[in-house]
Structures are given as C-alpha cells and as structure tokens.
Amino acid sequence: MSCTKVRLVIFVQTLINPVGLKKRRILDLVEENYVFASVLHHFGIDFYDYQEQNLAEVCKKKGLKPELIIAGLEDVIEDDQEHLQYLIGLPVDLVIAYLKHKHFSFVKHTLPYLAKLINCYPSQGGCTVINDIKWLFPLFVEDFIQHMHEEEDTVFQHILQIEKALKGEVATSSLFFNLKKYSIKAIAHEHQAHDDVMIGIRKLTNDYAHEKDSPVLLKVIFSELQSFEKNLIIHSRIENEVLFPKALLMEKELYKVISKYSVLN
C-alpha cells in the first residue's frame, strides 16, 4: 500500500470515531485533508457552502449517510504509479482503453471540478494569482481537450490499426502510407517534448505555494491543481514507458511482415 493510501486509511479511521464524525466542522475536515473536498463534491456538496456545519448536519440535510462519504475517500484516490506497473503486462488495446478512460475522467470529472473551485473564489479583493488563473485555466482546458482528442483520433487509432494488421484483421497494405506518415519513434519523441503541459499554471502559482493562513479554498485549489499535475505526469509515463515501446515493437514487426510479403511478390 502506498504512503498516500496509508495516510488516507488513518484519516478514515479517525473519522469513524462517533465524536469526530458528528461534531467536527466541514472546514476542519477539509483542512486536515484537501481530498475530502473532492469527496464532498462527488456527493453534490460544495464544502465552502457548509464550512461551519459538521458532517452529520450536512449529511442529514442532504439525505446522505456519513458512512458513504467516508467510504468515498478511498474511491477518489487512485495510485496510478501502481497502475503503470500493472499495464506493462497488458496488450496494447487494453493500455489504450485505460488511457482513454483516464481522458474521459479528466474531462468529465477533474477539469469541471477544478473550474468550479477556481470560479467560486472571490474576484474582488481576492488573490491576484487566482484572478490570473481564472483567465488562464479555460485556455489550458481548451488546449488540453483538443490534445486528447487529437491523440485518440490519430495516435491511438494508428496503433490499434497496426495491432489489427498483425492479427490479420485488416490488410497490411492499407497501412503502408500511414506507416510512412506516422512514425511511432517520431510520435514518442514529440510527445516527450510536450509533456509539461502544466508549466504555465505551475509558474503562476510558484509551484502551488501558499501562506499558512491562506483561505482553505485557495489551499484546496492549489492542492487539486498539484494533484492533477501528478496524475498527468504518471499518465504521460504510461504513454512513454508502456504504450510507445509496445507500439514501436509492433511497428517493427509489421515492417517485417510487409517486407516478407514484398519479397514473395
């Protein structure tokens, strides 16, 4: 079990205590572990609207069982580092399925949640950095989503076609021009050159640094941005260390098949 999961298990165990469960403020719970804010969001609760109320009060108001929210803590934490090791042994189509699932999760869950947190931060008399992020983040999201669509429609699709050709499901001749157009080595090199997509936001926030007495909403925003960046780093590693090496071997094998077929004809 990773250190992150160990800390979360300990945190969950402290919440199971009846006194801690019923009487601690939402604000205190979020300040102890910023992940709790995303758990509450998952259940339709924006923590900044209920900061002074305790968990039991909010759950009663929302018709929820506190145990469900506690159980949700571990559900939103994924150790993609462990996933990376597991994916090495899987065929390329399953690796791509996993990556596409992560793309979907980023677009449907992570990015909207981040956008909501950022937009809820007061603009007037608030943090200048957040005001800059409010301007920058939508541009980042637009570019990021476009990148994911292009990756799925071109790179992933091309690799899957190579796999199908090696299985005899499509004619190898149909990939001849695409093999010249899309070099896996060139794709991997370009991907590594553009890995650091969060550099602008990271520099703007000075590596997500904040004062000890900063508002908890600001701390949650910076924590979630940093967590998202860590997920993106692991996501890129899965592509660079798992997907592209597998695709490169497949590409070489397909060239051998084409070369053999050319000799026979």
Image (cartoon, rainbow, N blue to C red):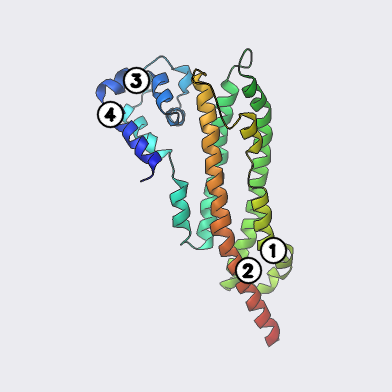
How far is the residue under mark 3 from the one under mark 1? 57 Å
Residue at left offset 47%, top offset 47%? 80
How far is the residue under mark 3 from the one under mark 4? 17 Å
Q: Is residue 105 visible?
A: no
How far is the residue under mark 4 from the one under mark 2? 53 Å
Q: Which mark identifies residue 16?
A: 4
Q: Quadrant of residue 116?
A: top right
Q: Amino acid at mark 1?
A: Ser
Query: What residue is pinned by disc 1?
Result: 183
Residue at left offset 56%, top offset 44%? 232
Q: Amino acid at mark 2?
A: Glu
Query: What residue is pinned by disc 3?
Result: 60
Q: Is residue 157 visible?
A: yes
**Which residue occupies the extreme left position in the image?**
18
**Which residue occupies the extreme top position in the image?**
125
The number of numbered badges drawn on the structure is 4
Which label lies toward us, 3 or 4?
A: 4
Query: What residue is pinned by disc 2?
Result: 251
Q: Is residue 169 above or below residue 262?
A: above
Could you say which is closer to the camera, residue 213 or residue 156?
A: 213
Q: Is residue 17 above or below residue 186?
A: above
How far is the residue under mark 1 from the one under mark 4? 54 Å
Q: Horizontally, is 7 left or right of 169 in the view?
A: left
